[in-house]
Amino acid sequence: MKRTRSRLAVTRFVGTAATGLLVAATAVAVPAQADPLPDQSSWIDAATAPPQYPDVHIEWDVPVTMSDGTVLKANVYRPADATGVPIDEPMPTLLTMTPYTKLISALADAAFSIPGMSDALTELAGDVDLSGTGVSGLGDLINTLDGGFVRGFALDRDTVRSGYTQVVVDVRGTGFSQGVWDVFQEREQRDSVETIDWAAAQPWSDGSVGMTGASYSGINQLQAAEKRPEALKAIFPLVPGSDLLRDIIAPGGGLGVGFLPPWLAGVNALKLIPDLGALARGEFDWAWLASRVEHPTVFFDLVAAALLTPTIDDIPPHMRDLLDADSSIRRDWSGNPSAITIPTFVVGGWHDLFTYSEPRIYDAIDTEPGRKQLMMGEWYHISATSGLGRDGAPPRLEVLQRAWFDKWLKGIDNGIDEYGPVTLFQQGGTWQRSDAFPNPDAEYTRLHLSPEPTGTAQSVHDGSLTSEPSASSETLTVAPGLTTMCSRDAAQQTAGLLAVIDACGKDGRIAQTNALTFTSAPVDRETVVSGPVGVHLETILDATDGYWAVTLDDVAPDGTSRQLTSGQVTASLRAVTESESVRAPNGDLVDPVHTLTLASRQPVVPGERTGIDLGLLATEAVIAPGHRLRVSVYAANVPKGLMLRPLLNESELRPQHLLLSPDAPSYITVPML
């Protein structure tokens, strides 16, 4: 990954009075007007024009044999004439590898293929507006139907009828495919490459393959592209991850309990659905059944070990592998997007499960901007694409995806490579396009956590954000709690489900009742935050371990505290890999990459001051005049991260202490313009 960033401009320290910090800071630089989004009419016309072919022919459960003899099952969707006969002409192929059983894709396709139903349903979904009801997040979720998420997750018949073959494959050990689910590991990655080669060699293929799909089907696109199979020409990953350990498995070293257990339960349950059609025909796959009986609950043993192992010495070997940077599973789950050279369009969200990775993926891909694109919306995992196609927003997902593959698989010069290359929704603002992210004009500013009250927060301690450290020393105490169960982090970790409740997904005040808060003076002009945010805490623990979580919020004049970004770390896993981390010119760590290994673990000495650096996810936001910035410090962050059981036992869930001192300041370093 490219870690040297010229965009980290010389750090700016302002010498204003403490409570006037942001007013003075924003007077230094006025954000430049962003470029408008380019014309999209030709892509919209292409996607909405009458299809080239009238029908789609489906070949169900086509066997695809891997090099080790395991048989995967694929549904093949081909353009067809009015009688349903597939077109003989070889065409480009779009491949989706899914663990959620292609049966779900088929059902979604069937629902959206009812004449008149799809357009009516998407139009109706796009008109839903629940603003002011307290459940506006539910409206955002419904709006994804209009934005194109379902077609991005399953398939788009209109794209097939425009001259593509789409192949949807159950990954090894899921759906109707044989074998044991390998969960993004080496054998599954090899399967993707072998399936690409198989598709390119079929008589209905012209030899060019693109990959589509969301979430899991976005991650394996990146993994396949890193292997550089010759036939793979372009990919379009929707809400993908790359560094899976830091994304969702153990953010900051804490187990992602809000997502992992229900997700694993869902996939392991879906893989048990039998092929009833084959059973009725007397063609049941007994090798499929044997693999399911032998391995019914893949990966649950690791979750159980993380939750139940009492001490470090008792950690079993398979769990130790997760905490060993050189183990095969860590290598498999740590992507290498710098190996990708083909055109790649990454679609992510500021509150997605994989926000940690998405800007990093774009930054690392080894091709020029235009051939690589990044789009980031104010989305959760399952609300991605909400609002696309509306005035001032990018076009619907299927329009962008169709234009992308028309360009790179069919050679149509439609200008999609001149889009973006970075298209962002500024939280608190509107859609913008840019040549880079973070904004190259952003300058890092250090804001100190100070004990002076502001009267703006109902929290354990209501402090201030100031330009200079407090003149006196003070130690603040916060205990682990569960108020973060209603928070934007909880909404993020539940993939967006909890976000339907605005009091949790769009307002942090409930969570902040068990936090130390530090709030700035109101800004007097529009201020942009752009990039990763660093936090340094001077801490004291009463045990050998603890857990720290920090959020950065935009506080409106009415008191609403809207979380922009967050980060967390287990105290004993605070060591960073310097070569992968980023520092501001003044030396502040602004994008620390925690090593997260047993070998680098550093138990805290009780009662001894310990400095801890943690990073908040990269973000883009505009702070309106009259709004404030707020930093909230927590001693827990359930369900986004629960300390691994042996470390949790060491923490004894004791209260934790934050030291505010002119000699040892705690601070946040924010990229602003």
Image (spheres, helix red, strand yellow):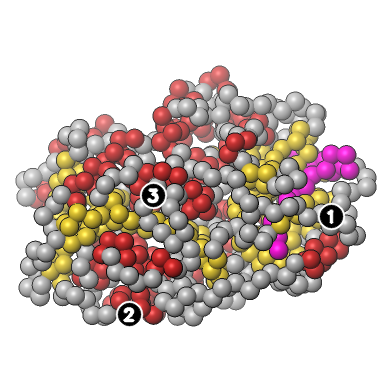
* Res. 70 visible in picture: yes
Q: Are marks 3 and 1 in contact (CB under 8 Å)?
A: no
Q: Residue at x 59, y 67 (%)?
A: 426
Q: Nearer the viewer, residue 6 or 500?
A: 6
Q: Earlier in the sequence, mark 1 or mark 2?
A: 2
**Distance from Cα at disc 3 to Cα at disc 1:** 43 Å
Counting other residues with Cα less than 10 Å from the Cα at mark 3, is it few (<14), some (14-19), or many (20 or more)?
A: some
Image: 304 above or below 454? above
Spot occupied by residue 316 in the image (x, y as percentages of width and height):
47, 23
Say what amino acid the circle numbered 2 marks.
Asp
Spot occupied by residue 50 in the image (x, y as percentages of width and height):
23, 80
Q: Earlier in the sequence, mark 3 or mark 1?
A: 3
* SS label for mark 3: loop
Residue 571 tag number: none
* SS label for mark 1: loop
Residue to which mark 2 is pinned? 45
Left or right of 632 in this view: 310: left
